Image (tube, rainbow, N blue to C red):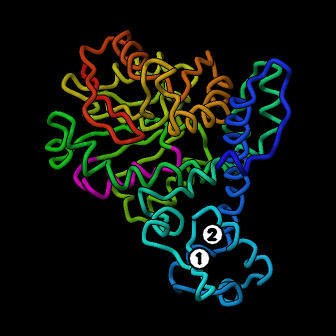
Amino acid sequence: MDMATAPALSGRADSNPRELATLSSTVYSDMAASATTILVYLGDRLGLFRALADYGPTRAAQLAALTGTHERYVAEWLAALAAAEYVTYDPDLETFSMTAEQVAVFADQDSPASIQGLVDVLVACSRDEPKLEQAFRLGTGIPWSERHPSMFSVAERLLRPAYEANLVQAWLPALDGVMDKLRDGANVAEIACGHGAATVIMAKAFPRSTFNAFDSHPPSIEEARRRARDAEAWENTRFDVAPAQDFPGRGYDLVTTLDALHVLGDPAAVACQVRRSLAADGTWMVVEPLADDDMENNFTTHGRTMYALSTMACVPTSMAQEVGTALGAMSGERALRRLILDAGFASVDRVAQTETSLVLEARP
């Protein structure tokens, strides 16, 4: 936002007027983005983005008719989204449309660039505001089972596009010798599997392997079983309720922990259990948010987003469990390496990364 258009604010007598104006401009811009986030959520829920992407240049009346919504609301929504440059306005034709890039971000839920999963998680977190306030005051956690019901599905929606784009194509191939084992028939465990999105992706890619997935949340396991059946990945998958620090089985060729280690209450105990469960030549793949070891180097858009999500979702989930380590989403590679090596692993290597994810390979 241009400082000339920022609201005029009066500061303390000892404040620097120019620095105050800069900060005010930044905050005002952030608040505008926050307000627009709710409209992005509504646009997804109501099918406005998808209809606009499919139909092409249109006006509010046409888009409202396509989506069964009210023209007046749609007109205001379109103006707000055009002001944010989330949709494109043609003043000569007085129509709205979406570029290929806007479609990838807002209308294609399978796109790795899709923002809708993040929007859904932010909205779900906001619904737990009273619980978060109490957690701040009392130093308690919020059990996963007590989060707003929408959280369980939106967490998967946030993460699944990255798994679809990277898991079989880049992350697993980066592990030494693992792809050959998976093709021939490996014994695999996934810890804290949620709704089983990653498990199903791997099971369909490697039908000779057996995938055992565990989560401590019974409704998530039931949903994972249903999704495996729907995806015709039932024959080589098994989903069971089990705590991450005490999941069953021994001799696994591969154990995966995807975007989950930092939300577990006792990640050190989990690392020890993974070490015990692996075959002598087994591999533990740990995927976590990409973060620098020094906090100040994470003061980026990605870091800012992840620290906020960690405050609202990851830390309270961990603190609600036994031990309650609360690593946080931005714990960094150094802390993760120390935790894994302390559990008795011989080596830990960074084998892959994306703009937002870090992939570690741990060997016994």
What amino acid does circle 2 point to? Ala
**Image coords of residue 353 (percent x, y):** 32, 37
User: Judging from the image, what secondary structure is the residue with disc 2 in?
Assistant: helix
Question: Which image quarter: residue 277?
Answer: top left
The answer to which image quadrant residue 289 occupies is top left
Residue indicated by mark 2:
82
Residue at screen point 44% across, 58% down:
228
The reply to whether residue 59 is visible in this rendering is: yes
Residue name at image x 57 percent, y 58 percent? 116
**C-alpha span from label 1 to label 2:** 6 Å
Q: Residue at x 65, y 30 (%)?
A: 311
Q: Which of 70 and 190 is in front in this view?
A: 70
Numbered disc 1: secondary structure:
strand
The magenta region covers: 194-209
Q: Is residue 364 magenta?
A: no
Compare marks 1 and 2 and give the one earlier in the sequence.
2
Residue wearing tag 1: 89
State the image coordinates of residue 306 (x, y, percent, origin top left): 55, 36
**Contact flag, marks 1 and 2 (Cβ < 8 Å):** yes
Q: What residue type is labelled 1?
A: Tyr
Residue 166, relative to residue 217: is it above or below?
A: below
Residue 208 drawn in magenta: yes
Q: Would you call the spot at circle 2 few (<14 residues within 10 Å), some (14-19), or many (20 or more)?
A: some
When the figure is inspected, residue 192 is found, relative to residue 108, above or below; the finding is above
- Does residue 12 appear to the left or right of 199 in the view shown? right
Give 71 or 226, whichever is nearer the viewer.
71
Residue appearing at x 72%, y 71% in the figure: 77
> Which quadrant holds the C terminus?
top left
